Every structure is written in structure tokens, then in C-alpha cells.
Amino acid sequence: MIDLSVTGGIAEIVLNAPKKLNALNEEALAELSRAYDDAEAAGVRALLLRGEGRAFCAGRDISAVDPANDDAYAYLGDLVTPLLKKMAAFPAPTFAAAQGACLGVGLGLLVATDVVYVADNAKIGSPFANLGATLDSGGHWLFTERLGAHRTLDLIYTADLMSGSEAVAAGLFSRAFPADELLDSTRAIVERVASGATGAFRASKSLVAQIRDSRVGLWTAMEAENTAQGELCRTKDYAEGFSAFIDKRKPVFQG
């Protein structure tokens, strides 16, 4: 479900499972990790990540998850976090073009990307209140860092979603484009950056990472999320939330 093409020094990685809204299972995460390895080996000057279809990425593919035996910590700590670290450390400018649902691990992919452009009608937030789980993949860090504590907890408690335009206005991401202009506009910017002083860009990328991580670091926050999710996946509400999602019914939580 992960496609990679390299043209003119630019890598384009595509999440290509539109019928599943590009939700990611263990196999897809491994494919995505290999795509970043292959792009690095090709010595590209810039990288674009996008999703095929009406969503960027709806998060973890839970269609085959058995909530009674799920190890959320292993999924996040052993698979997701190492991938996001690899993405964040990619040695060239990285961009994402995100439309539709950008949730859970899908949101984490954006956290780990240098520059994120979104469709004005993208859907961004934390749907986990409906699953008996908690926001993960760096979402707490991103929201608290850029939205503040009150707005973060509002989004988490209510499971309300922000549009792409709202997310950009709030400072979550860089720019919003009309959905039908998103990909072409992003590609044009990526081409311009790829022809620029990418050595200097690499230095700026490193400096920004140092400044960011001198505060409460992303990876420290992500490890705390992994631990919390690992504990929640053993609760009855977690099992109920996942079962209800799979059964397409409203969950009944016990608290």
C-alpha cells in the first residue's frame, strides 16, 4: 500500500490504500519505513508524503485488532515511534500534503514531517474519546505546544475535529489550500525547495530540532503516550470502543 517514486531528486511517497482511508497496519508501517530508507539511499533533495483518495491517513488500521489481546504499547513503541523518529531525522527537507482525515498515527506522520500543507477541508483532531483510548503518536505534544492546554483538552474530551483551515489559523500547520489545489501547490513548492541550498536547509532543520527538543521533547512526550495507551488497552472501555467501531455501533463506556 506504500508507493515510492523518485524523479528529479524528489521522492514522493504515497499511502495508497484509499478504500481503508490509508489506515496503517503493521505491514504498512514496515513498508513506509523501507520507503524512507530507499529515498535516503537515493540521495534525494526533498521528499513529499501524501495519501491517495479522500483521506491522508485515518490512523491505525484496527479492522483486525482483537481488543481483548491488543498490545498498544508494542504497536506504538516498537513500530510507530521508531518510524516517526526516522521520518523526523530524514536528511533532506520533507513535506506532506494532507487531505481529509488526518487522525491518530496519521496525525503522527504529520508531526514527524518538516512542513505540512493541508486541504482547507481536512479533518484534524483526536477521535480517541470514542474508542476508550488516548491520543498518541505525538499528538499531545503537537496540540499542547501549538494550541495550549485548554484547547488541547477540549479537542481530546469532545473528539471534535478541526478543519484544515482552522488548524492552520490556530498554528498547527503551515498553509491550507483548496482541496483541488493542494497537491499541485505542494509539488510546486517542493520542486522549488529541492532546487535550493539543501545543505543550508539541513542545518536549519537540525537547529530547529535542537530548539524544539530543549523544551519538553517530542520523544519524551511520545513515550509517555505509549505507556498510557499500553495501560488503557487492558481496560474494558478500550475493548468496548474498538468492538463498537468494528461493529459500527455507538460504544457504551463504563468509565
Image (cartoon, grey):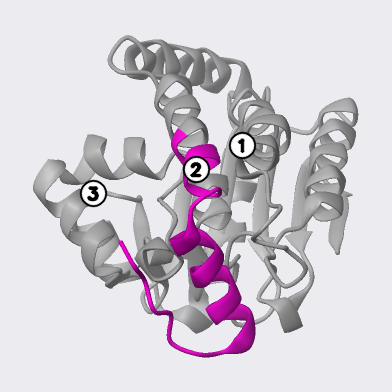
Q: In what element is the residue under mark 1?
A: helix
Looking at the rendered image, the disc whose residue lies closer to the viewer, 1 or 3, is: 1
Is residue 246 one of those drawn in magenta? yes
Q: Residue at x 49, y 70 (%)?
A: 241
Q: Position of residue 47 (x, y in %)?
A: 69, 43
Residue indicated by mark 3: 171
Is residue 20 one of those drawn in magenta? no
With respect to residue 221, does 231 lie above or below? below
Within-10-Å neighbours for mark 1: few <14, some 14–19, many 20+: many
Residue indicated by mark 1: 73
With respect to residue 223, does 56 lie above or below? below
Looking at the rendered image, the disc whose residue lies closer to the viewer, 2 or 3, is: 2
Q: In what element is the residue under mark 2?
A: helix
Residue stretch in magenta: 228-255
Per the rendering, the mark at residue 116 is none
Task: Depth check: give the residue in front, 184 or 58.
Answer: 58
Q: In what element is the residue under mark 3?
A: loop
Q: Residue at x 87, y 38 (%)?
A: 34
Q: Is residue 165 left or right of residue 78?
A: left
Per the rendering, the mark at residue 229 is 2
Q: Residue at x 41, y 51 (%)?
A: 134
Within-10-Å neighbours for mark 2: few <14, some 14–19, many 20+: many
Between the residue at mark 1 and the residue at mark 2, the CA separation in whole angstroms equals 6 Å
Q: Residue at x 67, y 44 (%)?
A: 71
